[in-house]
Image (tube, rainbow, N blue to C red):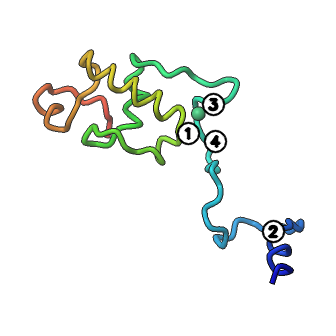
Amino acid sequence: MTNERERAGSRSERPDRGGRGGRGGGRRPRRRGCEFCGEDARRVDYKDTAMLARYLTERAKMDARRKGGACAKHQRVVARAIKRARFLALLPYTSEHVRLSGVNPVRR
Ligand SMILES: [Zn+2]
């Protein structure tokens, strides 16, 4: 019993070319991951609505975490920036707000 476990645990060098057998242990998505992590990371700027808009849904909700690809840490930073931008009326709060204000930073 323990034998099998060990065999599964030890990583033999197999080519393993991206079959979808692995069950989601990867915390880092293959697409470059969080854009705010790393050396040449951009800073989270609440004035950069074009960037913040990517972390909003069409209805201007704060979702799209997977789409944005930010890590949990920077997701929080982004969320704060979004809230600040909303407060400054740089971003809409809701889709209704978008309609009323006529501003739609989320380009579609
Ligand atoms: Zn990050």
Q: What residue is shown at x 83% (from left), y 79% (from top)?
A: 2
Q: What residue is shown at x 70% (from left), y 65% (from top)?
A: 18
According to the picture, the residue beneath numbered tag 1 turns out to be 71
> What number is the disc on residue 37?
3
Q: Give the residue type that dot 2 points to.
A: Gly
Do the numbered discs 1 and 4 sit on residues whose CB atoms are within 8 Å? Answer: no
Mark 4 burial class by Cα count in 10 Å: few <14, some 14-19, many 20+: few
> What number is the disc on residue 32?
4
Q: Position of residue 104 (x, y in %)?
A: 24, 30
Do the numbered discs 3 and 1 sit on residues whose CB atoms are within 8 Å? Answer: yes
**Viewer-side residue, 73 vs 1:** 1
Dot 1: element: loop
- Mark positioned earlier in the residue sequence (2 or 4): 2
**Viewer-side residue, 27 vs 50:** 27
Q: How many angstroms separate mark 4 from mark 3 (CA)?
A: 10 Å
According to the picture, the residue beneath numbered tag 2 turns out to be 9
- Quadrant for ligand 1 reads top right
Check mark 3 vs ligand 1: CB closer than 8 Å? yes or no. Answer: yes
- Mark positioned earlier in the residue sequence (4 or 3): 4
